[in-house]
């Protein structure tokens, strides 16, 4: 039985990755560093901001001029807010899918490597701003994807707001990256991958692969949880 749908955020609900990429590079420019787009998508997508800056520090062997990573994260958040404020970033079909889930009384959640502040900024003023029953952000976990911590915490929080118990097998996850798929699989949840960020070949471990949220209907989600 389908009881909950858990959305990744960047690349699934919001096409915010280009803004994240640009924000990282604007902060890194102060240290004479730039990362290439291919490098960002191959190595850093799915990381929390802290993990990304830590990895860059390690790979580039720099100390960020003794500026703390916490400060870099704050600066990156400021730049990101400026960029995302231009609007038009919600992915096609998501608003309609969320409305259909709400109408069917299915619990909906977010499990994202983005910070709570970033998620709030991106949802602000949209028709789905207050639609999610629970949100798990980078602020809530110690390990990002592919670790299952975020999805397991989402399940715990869903159970706290649900009238009846929700099991992992009663949850469908919508992801766009290999890291997210691994994370959800470790949490024993059903997984639908959408090719917003990566080609289908890199998402083959999902239970189902789609090209757009518009392809998803409640009956399709229910079938995944029929076992």
Image: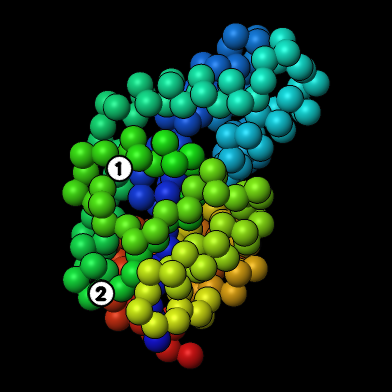
- Classify mark 1: residues with Cα within 10 Å, few (<14), some (14-19) or many (20+): some
- 182 to 14, vertically: above or below: below
Q: Is residue 59 left or right of residue 194?
A: right
* Residue 137 seen in the figure: yes
Tell me which numbered mark, 2 or 1, is placed earlier along the sequence.
2
Q: Is residue 149 left or right of residue 155?
A: right
Residue drawn at (29%, 27%), measured in percent from left and top?
85
Residue toward you, 73 or 174: 73
**Looking at the picture, how far across and down is residue 95, in whole percent?**
23, 55
Instruction: Please tell me whether mark 2 sits on a helix, a strand or a loop.
Output: loop
Residue toward you, 124 or 182: 124
In the picture of the structure, the residue carrying the numbered disc 2 is 105
Q: Which mark is residue 70?
A: none
Q: Quadrant of residue 203?
A: bottom right
Quarter of the image with the N terminus in it = bottom left
**Looking at the picture, how far across and down is residue 110, in whole percent?**
42, 56
In the picture of the structure, the residue carrying the numbered disc 1 is 123
Instruction: Please tell me whether mark 1 sits on a helix, a strand or a loop.
Output: helix
**Looking at the picture, how far across and down is residue 187, in whole percent?**
60, 69
* Residue 209 seen in the figure: no
- The reply to whether the C-beta atoms of the residues labelled 2 and 1 are less than 8 Å apart is no
- Classify mark 2: residues with Cα within 10 Å, few (<14), some (14-19) or many (20+): few
């Amino acid at each position: 039985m389908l009881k909950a749908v858990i959305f990744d955020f960047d690349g699934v609900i919001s096409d915010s990755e280009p803004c994240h990429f640009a924000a990282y590079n604007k902060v890194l420019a102060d240290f004479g560093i730039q990362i290439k787009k291919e490098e960002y998508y191959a190595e850093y997508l799915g990381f929390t901001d802290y993990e990304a800056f830590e990895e860059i520090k390690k790979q580039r062997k720099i100390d960020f001029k003794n500026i703390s990573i916490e400060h870099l994260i704050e600066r990156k958040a400021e730049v990101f807010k400026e960029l995302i404020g231009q609007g038009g970033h919600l992915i096609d079909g998501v608003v309609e899918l969320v409305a259909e889930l709400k109408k069917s009384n299915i619990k909906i959640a977010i499990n994202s490597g983005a910070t709570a502040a970033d998620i709030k900024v991106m949802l602000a003023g949209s028709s789905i701003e207050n639609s999610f029953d629970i949100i798990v952000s980078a602020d809530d976990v110690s390990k990002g994807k592919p670790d299952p911590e975020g999805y397991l915490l989402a399940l715990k929080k869903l159970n706290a707001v649900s009238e009846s118990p929700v099991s992992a097998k009663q949850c469908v996850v919508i992801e766009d990256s290999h890291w997210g798929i691994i994370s959800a699989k470790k949490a024993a949840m059903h997984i639908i991958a959408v090719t917003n960020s990566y080609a289908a070949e890199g998402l083959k471990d999902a239970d189902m692969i789609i090209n757009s949220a518009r392809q998803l209907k409640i009956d399709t989600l229910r079938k995944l949880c029929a076992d």
